[in-house]
Amino acid sequence: MATPTTKSAAVDPTANSTATTAAEPSTAKTGSVLRARSILATRPLMGWRTVDILTIAFLGAALGIAFWGWGVFYNGPLSAITFGFAPLGGLFAGPWFLAGVVGGLVVRRPGAALFCEVVAALVSMIPGTEWGATTLVSGIVQGLGTELAFALLGYRAFGIAAAMLAGALAGPFAAFYESFTWIQDWSFAWKAAYAGVLAFSGAVVAGAGGWLLTRALAVAGALNAFPPGQEHRENRAL
């Protein structure tokens, strides 16, 4: 997706299968204080399972459909808030980064964030959007931003801070791409402000929101075959 405030993404689950994740202890107790740790995907990290691929495809498809609807709706509030200062439109772009964050949090393998974001972009493109094929390009760029965050953390941290970093990094990537397309006529100051607003929206909406959504899916039992599901089971056992 693209336009002075556009992006692509997607949501929802599936999953079911046998035990599949675990790598390091998920919790440690010191007195009455519990320190949560991320459970990692089974090794080798590049050893994608069929259930990983199918789940990313379902998540991406569901989020793609949801955010095709968001693309139809958001031009209204966008027009109102950008009056006088267009970079504020980035506040509505956070949802487009959601697929990359959720995909990375669920599967926890290299490429999961990018894969989920790209699937979401493709699906959201199918019914037709005002941005056409640039929707896919935006999905790739945004997915690279979220993927970079998990890579910088060595695919070993998947808490809310990691999720917010992933959502935030998608913002500057998106702003860079759009600076050559939809906002090329803006001043450098406006482009820089837009990148900052996108990062903020990405951190809060896609990052914190994606983390909460992943936890909700785990609580519902939809992620039993993945690390978030195991973390939920272990936390309940404490």
Image: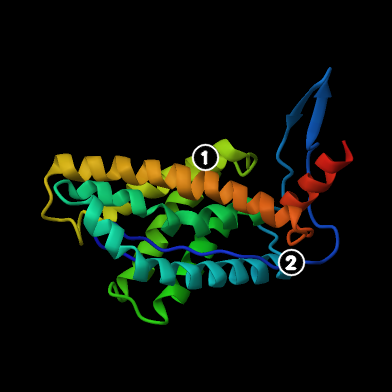
Q: Secondary structure at mark 2?
A: loop
Q: Secondary structure at mark 1?
A: helix
Which residue, given by chain and number where applicable, does mark 2 sit on? 15
Total number of numbered discs in the rendering: 2
Crowding at mark 2 (Cα within 10 Å: few <14, some 14-19, many 20+): some
Q: Horizontally, is 58 left or right of 73 in the view? A: right
Residue 6, given in percent of the width and then of the height, sits at 32, 60
Viewer-closest of 78 and 8: 78
Counting residues from the start of the chain, the first of labels 2 and 1 encountered is: 2
- Quadrant hosting residue 60: bottom right
Identify the residue shown where x is 84% and y is 42%: 236
Question: Going by the picture, which residue comes out furthest to the right?
Answer: 237
Taking the spot 52% from the left edge, 59% from the top edge, the residue there is: 99
Q: CA distance from mark 2 to mark 1?
A: 27 Å
| Amino acid type shown at disc 2 | Ala
Give the camera-side residue of 4 and 145: 4
Does residue 205 appear in the picture of this structure?
yes
Report the amino acid beneath label 1: Leu
- Say whether residue 201 is left or right of residue 98: left
Rendered image coloring scheme: rainbow
Q: Quadrant of residue 57?
A: bottom right
Residue 151 appears anywhere in the view: no
Q: Is residue 180 left or right of residue 206?
A: left
- Find residue 117 and report its horizontal and vertical position in percent: 48, 62
Image location (x, y in percent) of residue 185: 10, 55
**Do the numbered discs 2 and 1 sit on residues whose CB atoms are within 8 Å?**
no
Mark 1 surroundings within 10 Å by alpha-carbon count, few (fewer than 14), some (14 through 19), many (20 or more): few
| Residue indicated by mark 1 | 152
The C terminus - image quarter: top right
Residue at the (83%, 25%) spot, across then down: 29
Q: Residue furthest top?
A: 31
